[in-house]
Amino acid sequence: MDLTLWQYQFRIIMLGDSTVGKSSLLKRYTEDLFLDTINQTVGVDFYVHFLEVEPGVRVKLQFWDTAGQERFRSVTRSYYRNSVGGLLVFDMTNRASFEHIKEWHAEVWERVQPYKVVFVLVGHKCDRDEHGDRAVSREEAEKLAGQLGVPYVETSAKNGHNVREAFEMVARRVYQGLLSGEVQLLEGWDGVKCAAPQLCRREGPVWLRPAPPPRRRSAVLELCFKDKAEQAVLICDVR
């Protein structure tokens, strides 16, 4: 695949508590690597991957890996609005991370309106199941997925189980949403971008529409230093 050519760009956000393994999942999917220890995300990290969702249709996937710690929530919330997909990740050995999934889902849903976000629920670290460390049953997770109206998949970044399937599931659901009209390509919204907007307007299954006025606008000023840990982001709401 020629990585310089793509028809669409989807922005997908990783959601969930700290240490559930969001960064490990991304590293396994984008680089096919697993590290026993990985630094906690500070603010937001970015990953890019390319996927052919159907023959001749290439999508650039831009992943936003958000920090799960509460002190970074004001930073990560500023990225919700421009996301079209989200992976809701919990650690299958950590029940609290599972119980917080509804909060993550509600927080994003509240802030993205009137735009559409497609979610997938991910139970991570399923390799620990064989050691008897599971704290959340599959039945419980599937019940929650049903309540949220999203699919559920169990993954392991350590052995690669279902990692590709989880990421491609959300990407293909976004693409199917574009075809059906559930997800719309909107001017002024970065959740979905078309490499050739003029073709999207005239020829594609998706029409480029004006974006509805947002309920509020955020001005983001980023101050970046050499040490990533010193990165600061100032967010000011413009009412």
Image (cartoon, rainbow, N blue to C red):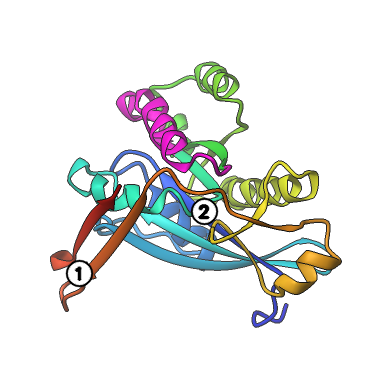
Instruction: Assess disc 1: are there few (<14), some (14-19) or many (≥20) residues with their C-alpha within 10 Å of its C-alpha.
Output: few
In the image: residue 114, left or right of residue 78: right
Quadrant location of the N terminus in the rendered image: bottom right
Residue 20 vs residue 160, the one in the foreground: 20
103 lies above or below 45:
above
Q: Mark 1 points at which residue?
A: 228
**Relative horizontal placement of residue 33, taking residue 116 as reference (left or right):** left
Residue 122 visible: yes
- Residue lying at 55% horizontally and 44% vertically, measured from the top left: 115
Q: Distance between the residues labelled 1 and 2?
A: 22 Å
Residue 223: % across, % down: 19, 71
Percent across and percent down for residue 6 are 69, 73
Per the image, is 125 magenta? no
Position of residue 228 relative to residue 176, above or below, is below
Which three-letter amino acid code belongs to the residue tagged 1? Lys
Residue at 57% across, 67% down: 49
Q: Quadrant of residue 102?
A: top left
Residue at horizontal 42%, vertical 29%? 106
Q: Given this view, does label 1 or label 2 mark the residue nearer the observer?
A: 2
What is the quadrant of residue 117 in the picture? top right
Instruction: Give the mark nearer the N terminus: 1 vs 2.
Output: 2
Q: Mark 2 points at which residue?
A: 12
Name the residue type under label 2. Answer: Ile
**Circle on res. 17:** none
* Magenta-highlighted residues: 89-116
CB contact under 8 Å: marks 1 and 2: no
Q: How crowded is mark 2: few (under 14 residues within 10 Å), some or many (20 or more)?
A: many
Q: Which secondary structure lies at badge 2?
A: strand
Q: Report whether 190 appears left or right of 198.
A: left
Task: Provide residue 98's location: percent of width, then percent of height.
Answer: 39, 27
Using the rendered view, name the quadrant where residue 194 is placed. bottom right
